[in-house]
Image (cartoon, grey):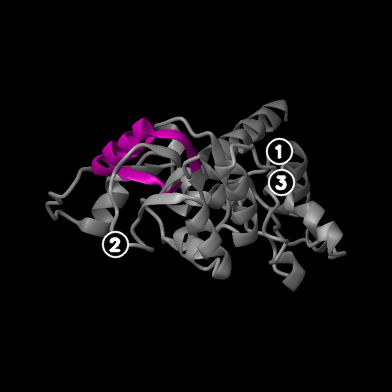
Amino acid sequence: MSSPKVGFYGFTGCAGDQLMVLNCEDRLVDLFGATEILSFAMAKSDNHDGELDVAFVEGSISTEEQLEHLKDIRKRSKMLVAIGTCACWGGPQAMKLEEGGYEERYKKVYGNASIELSKAFEAQPVDAFVKVEMKIPGCPIDKTEFLSAVTKVVAGRHPYLYKFPVCTECKWKENPCILTEGKFCAGPLTKAGCGAVCPSHNIPCVGCWGPTDDLNVSAEYNLLREKGYDVDEIVKKIKKFGGAGVAKMVKELSAKKEAKK
């Protein structure tokens, strides 16, 4: 039986997820031994295109050239896995989605310079353009969670990824709830998997793992409003990593509550 053919690709982001894969150290040898890696620019020089069993994609999509490359990867892959928050939800670079004003923001950075390499557009997550079978979130991804998932994926089985929020991991570690102290913590809305590393150091969760599967936006919104946070601040903080989708839910909820007043 031939080894699964795998490719790793990076688009708009910091490349931290690919670096985390390389940081798997001794397990990396097992990963390379169990698969045939056709493309991984950060790990090998003899990269080439070809039919893939699994493609791992990091980063959001922000240029026409990237979009063409992504579609080619999707066409050649039986399964596409988005790795990292930028690929899954768009990342911080997508936090202004649905607000408009992209052209003005672009001009503030590049001025009137003529960019000829590729036409840019506002960054969006991978699944805004192609079908994604699975998402492994993180900023960057957790190498233990990644290895656990990829071991099952290459064996043709569906991995189990946490569906509950960071709050559960806080309870496992017996951390005091930061929200009760009046601090803005996105833990109730954020997918677990990071090990509650920030709350364990008394730092509020900023939501870098992206939205959890079972969002209770209403409860979080009401609690934060009770703590004195205004609507714009709530939306801004949630959009940083949760993406435009979650922010839209908060805005709609806010509009309904304001209409009832």
Q: Earlier in the sequence, mark 3 or mark 1?
A: 3
Residue extending farthest to the bottom is 201
Among the two numbered marks 2 and 3 on one chain, the one whose residue lies closer to the N terminus:
2
Query: Where residue 70 sits: x, y (%)?
Result: 34, 39
Quarter placement of the C terminus: top right
Q: Is residue 94 left or right of residue 115?
A: right
Return the residue at label 2: 45
Amino acid tagged 2: Ser
80 within the magenta span: yes
Q: Which residues are magenta?
A: 57-81
Which label sits in the foreground, 1 or 2? 2
Which label lies toward us, 2 or 3?
A: 2
Q: How many angstroms separate mark 1 from mark 2 (CA)?
A: 42 Å
For the residue pair 166 and 22, the one nearer the viewer reads as: 22
- Three-letter code for the amino acid on which mark 3 is drawn: Tyr
The residue where tag 1 is placed is 215
Q: Callout 1 environment at 10 Å: few (<14), some (14 to 19), or many (20+)?
A: some
Residue 27, by quadrant, is bottom right
Residue 162 got which mark? Answer: 3
Q: Secondary structure at mark 3?
A: loop
